[in-house]
Image: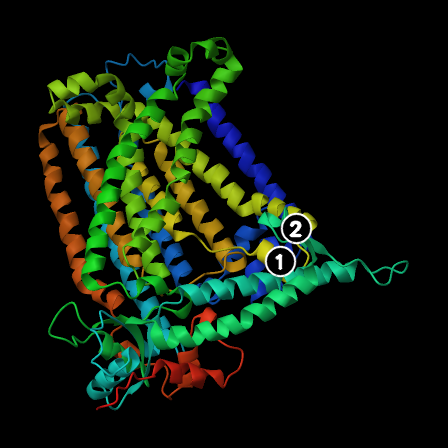
Amino acid sequence: MDFSSFVTSLGTSLIIFVLLMLLFTWLARKPGNAVIYYPNRILMGLDPLEGRTLTRNPLAWIKEAVKASEADVIAAAGVDATVYLVFLSSVLLPVAATDNGTQSTTDSNSHGTFKNLDKLTMGHVQVQSSRLWAFLLGVYWVSFVTYYVLWKSYTHVSDLRARAKSSAVVKPEEFAVLVRDIPAAPPGQSMKDHVDSYFRALHPETFYKSMVVTDNKKANKIWEETEGYRKKLARAEVVYAGSKTTGKPEGTRPTNRTGFLGLVGPKVDTIDHCNEKIQELLPKLEAEHKITLKEKQQGAALVFFSSKPAAVSASQTIHAQKIDTWTLMEAPEPRQVLWTNLPKKFYEREIRSLIVYGIVFLTVCFFMIPITFVSAFTTLENLKKYLPFLKKIVDQPEIKTVLEAYLPQIALIVFMALLPAFLVFLSKEEGIPSESHAVRAASGKYFYFIVFNVFLGVTIGGTLFGSLKEIIKKPKDIITLLGSSLPKSATFFVTYVALKFFVGYGLELSRLVPLIIFHLKKKFLCKTEAEVKEAWAPGDFGYATRFPNDMLIITIVLCYSVIAPIIIPFGVVYFGLGWLVARNQALKVYVPRYESNGRMWPHMHARIVAALIVYQITMLGYIGILREFPYATLLIPVIVISFIFAYVCKQRFYLAFFHTPLEVACQGTKEIPNMESIYSAYIPPCLSTEKHEDVDRFEDAHSHSLRTTSL
């Protein structure tokens, strides 16, 4: 990439960000857009503009984000969002401290002139120069700053989690445990009776009741069909009411066809048809309730206790001699339970996990091929080579500059956008019991995927594409190849980081895409208030992709901090601006789908350390091999220290995240809450009823015993 392309990339990205920020300032002031820019506050029942002065200052949102306290963020977006902001701020300091690369001097081989920016960013220090001591010591400096910040952050997040867990607010999951791998019930007993008798014998003072997991597929299908007709009925009634005018007070009743997508089949009155279908489905749903609760009980259950300490103690106690029976864990939140995964048996989960990680391994390995192809193909030289008919077009100076500035980065971003949903699907197929656990698992897979396939793939991809024969003949040369190819990819990653924060954060702040989609849906598709609310529903942070992408950036910035020190300010801006934007969105926009009380942090911590180790190994290879510095081996101890640091942190902090400490559970709620409401919170929607007294019927059906008559 030449200097003009580099400047074009940065300049246009900056202009786009400024325009998007100005758009955000203008659009956020319009009352009709409040549901897009302040949905969190609206859903909390607050005035979206309360305490805010309408101003044309495009930086006013920064002042509001900085002034907000940590308690404000927790109240608005929960502990998970607060922990994510701790992650951004804890990463910012080590990145900012990575300034040792600025001490480089001009290489004698460069003659003081450079034809392109790639040469400018190679860390021009002479081979075996004594100045390499500065870089070596710089690695130690960055490493120890990272250790310090991570230790303080781990302590802070641990305290945040403890405060949330000891809150006086009643949370159903704190009084429940999830029981899996329940053995078959004895003859004459239902699964419900089997579970009740087992836990009543072991916890006679604190056991409340149990809820056995059932196979709800058929009931859920009927329930979803019923809900679909109810939504369609509400929409039809609004359309009918809107058709009544002074000239035609009787209005026009809406109609639809009953065939595929409402396009074929006989035409019917929509209101009458929906009412008939609902009346037809309700008895079927009621009958399926009874069948499901009596005959479709499975080998998993939620067991409820009358106190938080009792539930915590039970979840951490080994209840059976065999590892594959009566396995207990803390119950997930009601809103994030993956019901179909709960009955999966111990060995089935183990086998599924092995298969999933095998698929992920193959995906990581074979995805390198298209990533390598993209990184090699999306250069102007290769475009002209493989697509000669484009030569006249790409040789135009203006087009050439734009293509060099954006083509590889955009191709990579689009390519990677297709992956996250697949990884979340795979994680759920492991048999994971909760949504937050699945997100953590998918996040881990995605992190290692992008490190291997984006960072390493782009770094050595283009070289591998043209040097495969040499590597096959001399496999040891791959280390030298990696070291020599790092500088060549530096400007790609500089512009990649700039594109991510200027355009990415600009789009997130302006919410231009959600705004356009909302107004289109509201004008052409939405008829009822429920449909309008669904159209502007903001969603959450999307941790499964957001965090791994941030981790890719810190890996890139650390590894290129010496080789291409120009990347350091871009990394600082990425995490600094990211902290401001994320804080703004947490306070005003995003609504959490679940709350895990910072359970993601140990995984964040481990991957920051992993990124640091990648940085240390990269510097060992770069200084030792390319610069032929004999003292590069002195970096080996700091790599060992990183592993020791990770181990010590895990031993000290991790158990308090995996289990709730008893001293934490004993704080907060002192009185026994309404246990029936806690129990009812876990009843699946397809089995719930509107009548309160039907909860007892639900319980009676669950405890139905299959008695036999003796002859």
Q: Nearer the viewer, residue 31 or 182?
A: 182
Q: Amino acid at mark 1?
A: Glu
Task: For the C terminus, give its image quadrant.
Answer: bottom left
Q: For residue 156, what is the image quadrant?
A: bottom left
Callout 1: SS:
helix
Tags 2 and 1 in contact by the CB under 8 Å rule? yes
Q: Residue at x 37, y 41 (%)?
A: 419
Position above or below: 93 against 320: above
Residue 461 image position (x, y, % from top left): 28, 25
Residue pointed to by mark 2: 525
Q: Residues within 10 Å of mark 2 (few under 14, many from 20)?
A: few
Instruction: Check residue 420 in the rendering and tell me which mark sits there, or answer none.
Output: none
Q: Residue at x 27, y 58 (%)?
A: 602
Q: Residue at x 37, y 15 (%)?
A: 382
Q: Nearer the viewer, residue 266 or 79?
A: 266
Residue pointed to by mark 1: 531
Residue 345 image position (x, y, % from top left): 22, 64
Position above or below: 694 against 277: below
Q: For residue 666, what is the image quadrant?
A: bottom left
Callout 2: SS:
loop
- The alpha-carbon separation of the residues under discs 2 and 1 comes to 8 Å
